[in-house]
Image (cartoon, grey):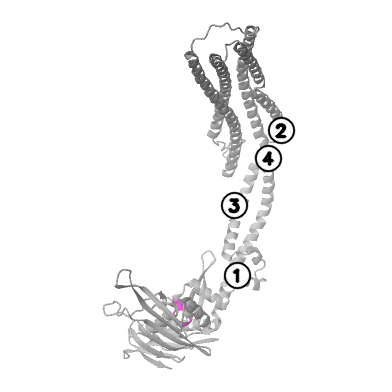
Amino acid sequence: MKEIKLLRLKLENFKACASRTFEFNGRDAAIYGANGSGKTTLYNALTWLLFDKVAGDDGTVMTAPDIKPNGADGEVADHTAISSVEAAFSVDDGTVTLRREYKEVWEAKRGSAEKTMNGHTSLYYWNGVPVQQKDFKERLSATIASEDLFWALSNVLWFVKGMSWQSRRAMLADVCGLQSDAEILSANAERFPGLAEAMSGLPLPDFRKKVDTDKTKLGRARDAYPARLDEIRKTIHQYDETDFDALRSAREAKDAEIRAKTDELSRLDNGTIIGEKRNELQGVRNRARTLELENQEYRQSQTPPPDNRRPELEKNLRERKGALSSAEVRAEDERDLIGRCESQIEALRTECRAVNGELQKIKAETFTETNCPTCGQPLPPDAQEKARQQFERDRKRRYDAGKKRKADLTARANEIKTMIAAAQKRLDEAVAAAEAEKGKIAELSAALDSLPAAQTRIVSDLSNYAADTAAYNRQIGALQAEIDKLQEESAASRNALTQEIARLSAEKARLDEQIAEEKVLENYRTREAELLESMANAAEEIATLEKWRDMVDEFTRFKAQAIEDSVNGHFRTVRFKLFQPQVNGGLKECCDAYVGGGRLDHGLNTGAEYNAGIDVIDALSKHYGVRVPLFIDGAESVSELLPIDTQVIRLVVSRDDKQLRLEVI
């Protein structure tokens, strides 16, 4: 047992005390004084030194109190005064001296000679050696006691009035070793067989709630089983004549048709035949251009000497006109391609609008099957809810199939839009090239016009130039006519194929919806078996829950009595009530102290309160192995204090003692 005794307490400029030293020498003592003479200040000075707190009249504490001496006007009497408290303790066989000094800090701001107060500072000393506050508190806790424990052992009202009931209960649990539910059950396993395992680590109140909730749910389910089973069997009967294998075969056939039509549409979209015709047309145009260039070279060979610029300009002009013709042909090809793509997009838009219409119809559908299809009577709420859920699942499947078709149409449209964007880019390039060639042609024409008139010459063409050129022009016209016809036929075929694919996809979606019902049927059959099993088990489970509920109530009463008996065995006069019975049969935790049937914080006389506090302090000291000086303020109100083996300092009101008088016992 660690014995902490107060040897000396010295105060300087602490509240109303200018300077005073009290020599206790580790013995019991009584300090006499009239009201307002400073008796309570002694205990406040000690706790301020140790913890920067002072005790209130109701056993509570106040943090960071104002301890500076004040004048008659209520203001600080001396701003230069240093307030200090020094205490010497005997700790077992040694001595520890603690000191704290507190003063105002005055500083002159930059650029001013006048000083102003800038807060306060504290200096701490351990056996005369200055230490930091952190070090001071750590040594104090290790050498004397922790702050919470010191308050509980030095203040007779602290345990009952200064602590919350939760903290008070926690300290009792530490001192008295309050048993947990698991420990009580383990010690009384024969009386409450199987309860610990059933609780599975849940607190007792939670287990009670769980048992009651489970019992209520099981009872409701048991009563609802027959109606639910009847509805499930009616639903199963609806599928008795459905041939799901035939539905799957039909769906596979639709898949094959869709793939064939899609492949055909892909070939058509790729424009294989039209592409070949365009390539053939471009080849004829290239040959015609080659013939024209050869004829130009032939005619140029018949020109005058090279010092004349006209032949060169004429050659360049012919080349630029040929380049212009080629650019215009490319531009026309791209316009044709854009037109075909836009026709495809318009067809896709038409189909997409149709799909949107179907989706809107599906969204607008509402559940109306609230009556039994067999007898026409209104369905029970559970059956209506199941029918509504089935309706929502059916509607969702059809809606999802429509959304998927819409997404496919959108994806195809986006692909075609990408083709249009690429074709538009090539068209813009061809148009720009044609405009550039026109500018060059204008420049060359102007240059030729500015030259002096050339001598008249007879220049002839190649012998076969006229005939071959006419033949090429006929081929070009025939090929262009074929391409125009193919494009017109391709648009009609594409629209027909797109509509056919949409029709087949809708039929396949309907087959998918019907096939999906097979899974619904399996789920209903599984649910039927589960309900039959649940009906067989419900009664047994409810009986088990009722057994646990009765055992919980019995254990609750047993636990409350056992714990309170265990705690109260540690005290001489005080009795603690740790549980309050509830209307639902449970217990609510509390921590109320009683003496002779009266509750400590509900108007007991001072003597009963103080002796109850001494009883508690004695038990706490024995458990924690430490005794500290016990201050009893207002000791004149108690005729006889409960004996305790610790240093007791009584603060007694004495009308005749205007100054504090120390009497060591």
Check contact, mark 2 vs mark 4: CB within 8 A: no
Q: Are marks 2 and 3 in contact (CB under 8 Å)?
A: no
Identify the residue under disc 2. 248
| Distance Cα–Cα, label 2 vs label 1 | 62 Å
Indicate the secondary structure of the residue bearing disc 2. Answer: helix
How far, Cα to Cα, is label 2 from label 4? 13 Å
Residue 606: x %, y % from top left: 41, 82
Q: Amino acid at mark 3?
A: Arg
Q: Position of residue 286 (x, y in %)?
A: 63, 17
Q: Is residue 155 magenta?
A: yes
Q: Is residue 372 visible?
A: no
Is the C-beta separation of discs 1 and 3 under 8 Å?
A: no
Amino acid type indicated by mark 4: Lys
Q: Quadrant of residue 157?
A: bottom left
Question: Disc 4 vs disc 3: which is toward the camera?
Answer: 4
- Residue denoted by label 1: 181
Dividing the picture into quadrants, the one containing residue 464 is top right
Horizontal and vertical percent position of residue 327: 56, 20
Q: Residue furthest left?
A: 73
Position above or below: 505 against 44: above
Between discs 1 and 3, the one toward the N terminus: 1
Sequence-wise, which precedes: disc 1 or disc 4?
1
Q: Amino acid at mark 2?
A: Arg
